[in-house]
Amino acid sequence: MLRHLLKLVWNRKRANFLIVLEIFFSFLVVFVVGTLGLFFWDNLQAPLGFEYRDVMVAKIDTQSFDDGADPERLAMVKRLLDEVRAMPAVVSAAPAMIAPYEIGGWTSRLSFEGRRLELGMDAAGYERTMGLRLIEGRFFAAADEALDWQPVVINSALAREVFGAASPLGRRFGDPPADGSGPEQRVIGVIEEFRKDGELSRPGYFAFVQVRDSDRTPGRLLIKLRPGTPVAIEEALARHLQAVAPEWSFELEPLSRLRDENYRTRLIPLVVGGIVAFFLLAMVGLGLLGVLWQNLLRRAREVGLRRAVGASRSAIHRQVVLEQLILASFGIVLGVALVVQLPLLELAGFLSPRVFFAGLLLASLAIYLLAALCAFYPSRIIGLVDPAEALRYE
């Protein structure tokens, strides 16, 4: 029967070409939107690595165009931290180059035994303020500033990638600079996970280093507040910071607000894509329904002849649905042939194989379901036509 159906489809190849083309483009749109949705959903299942509730972010503007090292600015940041920590409503405070959930950040390329890894970095001090969970080793201490090497705390993903199953504690972090500049870095602790870009971002590599006088000035203060602190604390904190550093300017907002903005920024393209995909599938569905209906009217004599020689209504119904599914298969095969080039060309490196193949499966099922639904009603109607009337149909 399959051979007969393929022959029928081939005999109407000109009419079916446009249908296959519509299915092909619909498959691509559904794949992109569906895979992006699965990517975000998969990321949501992974641990975040920090606590964002009751945390205030103070953005610092030093009124300077120089982002390099400045011991005086670093000393002022330390003074601001001491002043903020002394406030009754504050549990802890820490410096940061950029706050969690903000777009962008401090990135570095780690060279280790010939391998190069890209990782996110930030200043030390997160542990209490952001509720980081330590797996082994320790966090930073005041005595670390006197060391002739720079301590580093890394996340578990980076530890596994660089050191494998061996303990990274006390190990050198990265190859020494070729020009001999900068202190040697060593690992003093490993945290469970840290996804600075939020729940919708994929897990990656991250490291914390202790900021010294030779490093650049942190641009953020992360302030952990006591639960139930009224919103009026935002204005009180701003006044206090401005009084300590009158030449600087500060902008305060809850970290939860940055989280909401991060969600909107990442989900808006998905929502827009979903709306586009819905209307495209609706248009394709109507087109399939109209073309199929027209084809069935032209084939009324063929259907009547089959009914006259004993074909049942269910057989006619099954034939029409299977023809549509075959057309859908052609469009899906073309789409899959194009999509599988993405990982081969390294254009979808952010997708895990599980998410990629789940997106392929989701898009294929959606197209098959659309084709079956569009074929269901016309096939039922044509199956109800009386054989004698169908044979007289012009």
Image: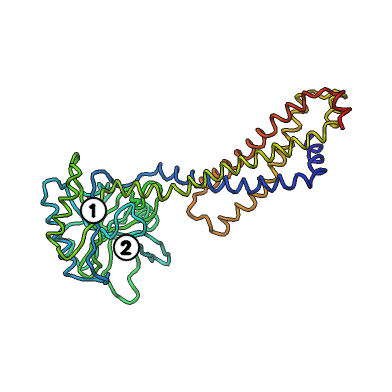
- Depth check, front residue: 137 or 120: 120
Q: Earlier in the sequence, mark 1 or mark 2?
A: 2
- Depth check, front residue: 172 or 360: 360
Q: Is residue 71 left or right of residue 165?
A: left
**Type of amino acid at the residue the image marks with label 1:** Leu
| Residue 173 - label | 2
Q: Element under label 2? A: loop
Q: Quadrant of the C terminus?
A: top right
Q: Is residue 230 above or below residue 302?
A: below
Taking the spot 38% from the left edge, 65% from the top edge, the residue there is 109
Q: Which residue is mark 1?
A: 252
Q: Position of residue 384 (x, y in %)?
A: 77, 23
Q: Is residue 146 visible?
A: no
Q: Position of residue 243 (x, y in %)?
A: 12, 59
Taking the spot 63% from the left edge, 49% from the top edge, the residue there is 25
**Type of amino acid at the residue the image marks with label 2:** Phe
Q: Quadrant of the N terminus?
A: top right
Q: Element under label 1? A: strand
